[in-house]
Image: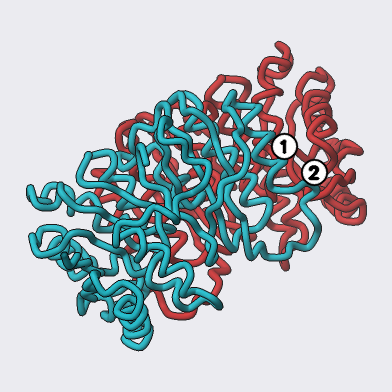
Chain colours: A red, B cyan
Amino acid sequence: MTRRIAICAPSTPFSRDDAARVSALAQAQFPALDLVFHDQCFASAGHFAGTDAQRLSAFLECANDPAFDAVWFVRGGYGANRIAMDALPLLGPVAHGKQYLGYSDGGTLLALLYRARVGRQVHAPMPTDIRRAGGEAAVGRTLAWLAGGGDGLEPSLDGRTPAVAFNLMTLAMLCGTPLLPDLSGHVVMVEEVAEYHYAVDRLLFSVTSCLAPLGIAGLRLGRVSDVPQNDRPFGCEVEDMARHWCARTGIAFLGRADIGHDIDNKIVPFGLA
Amino acid sequence: MTRRIAICAPSTPFSRDDAARVSALAQAQFPALDLVFHDQCFASAGHFAGTDAQRLSAFLECANDPAFDAVWFVRGGYGANRIAMDALPLLGPVAHGKQYLGYSDGGTLLALLYRARVGRQVHAPMPTDIRRAGGEAAVGRTLAWLAGGGDGLEPSLDGRTPAVAFNLMTLAMLCGTPLLPDLSGHVVMVEEVAEYHYAVDRLLFSVTSCLAPLGIAGLRLGRVSDVPQNDRPFGCEVEDMARHWCARTGIAFLGRADIGHDIDNKIVPFGLA
């Protein structure tokens, strides 16, 4: 049976060429999937993939259309927070039966939907990963998941402890806002890209300080990549930062997570896998 | 009567040459002030002005020494959060009678001290501002304040509404942590430097979402300077972002504040001026 996947852009725009490459990949390897790129993926308004109204409307069309089994965010980049709170009350019953997939800035919508228990949220590679060298593997991982396979799951998931995965900056910006879900008892996985080491340390301070009182099950550290060079070395490695702040705040540091802004980024269904 | 000012570096290091310039400025224009740069200002350990233990110890020496009337942070740059919580229980009665001055990353300590009601906290130019073109004006503003003058006060302060001033990123990182003071009824002034426009919008989202439930009196926007150029324009000005998020969260937007990472940065005593 064909599964129809709606693709929209809550944050920044994609290109038709890259969309065609993703569609071709899906047709070749996963003929049971029917990918439908909403035209809004290619809209542009300043930083964003169209105005807030355009992005909101496209997301709602995808989420509320019974023809689609899943809603896949085409790309991150910033902007989902500008439509998330408006979207929530406009999601109909059909929206509750779907998967929502993405990562990076897309985590903002995943967080709010998880908090509101609307559908199933999945940290997963996005169409934009086709732009990375070897990116077919990343995109294919999400396609395989959508086709019903479980091979791409993050390996530490044990099926007994609920988990979430977030970009560290995205999660830090959600802390203390009405978009943050109840993460008590959860393994929280974080990854980061293109932030200075001192900024990563600062984010870990903020996130661990905010999450500790919630009683999370622990923190796992994904990859921290493309760190810009500062005028001097920070003085310790990122894993040491994570251990430091977990120890300071009483959070269990559980080791590494196989997630990141790269082609090896694995799949983390929110809650129980 | 001579006022003795202790200067330490809770975040990143200073240089002896620049310290000498600040001391010379003080001697020439404010002979009643005696500036004492703690040697730790010139220590270095990776990113920081010495290890966490060194920075903590120097701050405590300055705060707990009855010979000093005020503690001035030499520079921001990141790191005060790594010593703030440890410092708090070690501050003696003497520390309660002092002023603490700084801004940028120094706002982390100002926040915690304000929350704990230890002394008087003042957003004010720091010795490091001597490095800016025309920076003598900024440094002199704080020196004049320490000498008892009120000329450098941020002009919107009305003496009836309590206020605070923060770097936007610093404040965002404090939201949801045990370092954030009770800001109910306060005018909150924010300024930013060297962040992309999309990051400023994201920070405003996070900070307004966190502060709105606290019942703040309103937000004032300081200067947002040295914005890096992104691959495309954001699409609206920073003041429009502030108005947008204030409107969305029900916070009164009160207009501009005369603060920023520049030589015009004015003085904002926390609470009532």
Task: Name the amino acid, label 1.
Answer: Ala
Q: Chain of mark 2?
A: A
Indicate whether A240 appears above or below A153: below
Instruction: Name the residue that disc number 1 marks.
Output: A147
- Determine whether, in the image, residue A103 is placed left or right of residue B104: right
Q: Chain of mark 1?
A: A
Residue at x 27% of width, y 55% of height: B100
Task: Name the amino acid, label 2.
Answer: Phe
User: Of B261 and B66, which appears nearest the observer?
Assistant: B66
Do the numbered discs 2 and 1 sit on residues whose CB atoms are within 8 Å? yes
Residue at x 61% of width, y 48% of height: A104
**Quadrant into which the N terminus of chain A falls:** top right
User: Of B270 and A71, which appears nearest the observer?
Assistant: B270
Q: Secondary structure at mark 2?
A: loop
Label 2 – label 1 distance at C-alpha = 7 Å
Residue A253 visible here: no
Instruction: Name the residue that disc number 2 marks.
Output: A30
Residue A72 visible here: yes
Outermost residue toward the bottom in this view: B17
Residue A237, x across and y down, in percent: 37, 69
